[in-house]
Amino acid sequence: MGEKASRVFFQAFGVIYGLVAVLGFFYGDAPLLGIVANNAADSVLHVVIAVVALYLGFGMKSEVPAAT
């Protein structure tokens, strides 16, 4: 596994968590899809996780090793 695999993982993870956050705000305090309990704190936490994951997947620049 390398840098490319990590980027793809965080990109997919961030998009999925972003969708879960949107669903959480849409459903309010009702269970998501009738299965998973949800409240406003969960939705905010999902937004924070999605933002961090999307930054790691799309925003970070690759580090070039220093020439020796």
Image: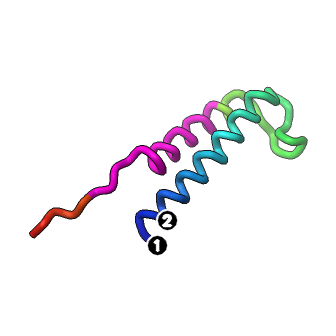
Residue shown at 63%/38% (left/top)? 46
What residue span does the magenta drawing correspond to?
Answer: 44-63
Image position of 33 (left or right of 58): right
Residue 23's spot in the image, x, y percent? Answer: 76, 35
Q: Quadrant of residue 29?
A: top right
Residue 53 located within the stretch drawn in magenta: yes
The picture quadrant where one finds residue 43 is: top right
- What is the residue that sits farthest to the left in this orientation? 68
> Is 26 left, or right, of 55 in this rendering?
right
41 or 59: nearer the viewer: 59
Check disc 1 and report the residue beneath it. 1
* Residue type at tag 2: Ala
Main SS, magenta region, reads helix
- Residue at (60, 53) in percent of width and height: 12
Q: Quadrant of residue 68?
A: bottom left
Residue for point 66% across, 47% down? 16
Q: Which residue is mark 2?
A: 5
Crowd class of label 1 (few under 14; some 14 to 19; many from 20; radius 10 Å):
few
